[in-house]
Image: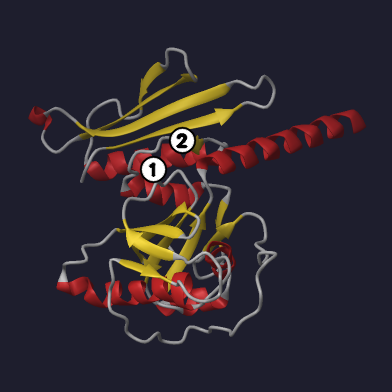
Amino acid sequence: MKDESVVLQHRESDNGETQEFRLQLVRSRPKAGNRWLVNFQYGRSGSKLRRGIKTPKPVSYEEAAAAYERLLGEKLQAGYRIVDDGELGPLTREARLKYSPIVKVVPLGPIITGERISKPRNYTKSRSWSGRKLRPLKSRPITSNAGASGRTPWRWREGRVAQTSEHFELRYGEASKGGWYDWTPVALVGRVSQGLCSVEFLIDRGDSRNSKIVKEVVNELNFYLVEKGEPQPWGYLQYHCGTMSNVYSSVHWGFLPSSAEALKRAGARTKNETRRATSNSHDE
């Protein structure tokens, strides 16, 4: 149980001002024991923010966590987007997946963006993959698909992933025993530059109890980023998130757009809703 905090912003369509909302889940003073508080600040971005508290008195971690997630969910559904580049805690990450209108869950769990994902323009049909087991591969610090094709070689390495930039989240679990929220978060995949991805494991790779999961995740990373030979693996993986092979695999890929892109789409959606409301009022 650790403190969590997040910063969100929302651009208003009528006056163009950016509203800011800051939320914290913090442990109360030591003398209060294992008690927690949920604090928040809000107002126009760049100005002095007003202060508020969701829990008038210290409560248990379970109560505070529920209040934190509920309030964060309300803001995400209202069009606010996470903007800070700090490390997101597990409650914040889960709420972003659960409540963001840009990220949706399709039956059995894999997540895709709100619009239908089409294959990249330069995607060429290759052999299909239907959840077959991948052959064991030795873990390597850096893996690359350099070859004679002349394309930019893709490779991956372990490192931090900025969760406000577009990235993938990998979860592990059986489709027959639950969905996205039941599966275990195991890794984040971010794009550092053209041809280079950073992979941040969310589980302890050194724990022998995780060896089977780590092995299958490494196989997935090597297959899709290196071995499969797609000209644009990043675009192909976005397409893969909406496929049934992703559902029935034990390693499930989910794509999250960047906070800036999500904020832009939310603003466009708000403008369209305003136009429709105005048009309807004129018709009446």
Mark 1 falls on what kind of element? helix
Mark 2 surroundings: few (<14), some (14-19) or many (≥20) residues within 10 A? some
Say which of marks 2 and 1 sits in front.
2
Q: Return the x and y of residue 152 as percentages of the image width and height.
A: 52, 64
Q: Which mark is residue 69?
A: 1
SS category of the residue bearing label 2: loop
* For residue 26, above or below residue 1: above
The mark nearer the N terminus, 2 or 1, is: 1
Q: Are marks 2 and 1 in contact (CB under 8 Å)?
A: no
Q: How is the image coloured?
A: secondary structure
Q: Closer to the camera, 120 or 240?
A: 120
Q: Is residue 60 left or right of residue 252?
A: left
Residue 83: assigned label: 2
Q: Residue at x 72, y 33 (%)?
A: 271
Q: Is 178 positioned to the left or the right of 267 in the image?
A: left
Q: Residues within 10 Å of mark 1 (few under 14, many from 20)?
A: some
Marks 2/1: CA–CA distance: 17 Å
Residue at image position (41%, 47%) is: 163
Q: Amino acid at mark 2?
A: Val
Q: Which quadrant of the view contains residue 11? A: top right
- Locate residue 66: give its quadrant: top left
> Does residue 178 show up?
no
Point 55% across, 30% down: residue: 10
Tell me the kind of residue under disc 1: Glu
The residue under the point 46% across, 65% down is 154
Q: Is residue 16 left or right of residue 256?
A: right
Q: Quadrant of the C terminus?
A: top right
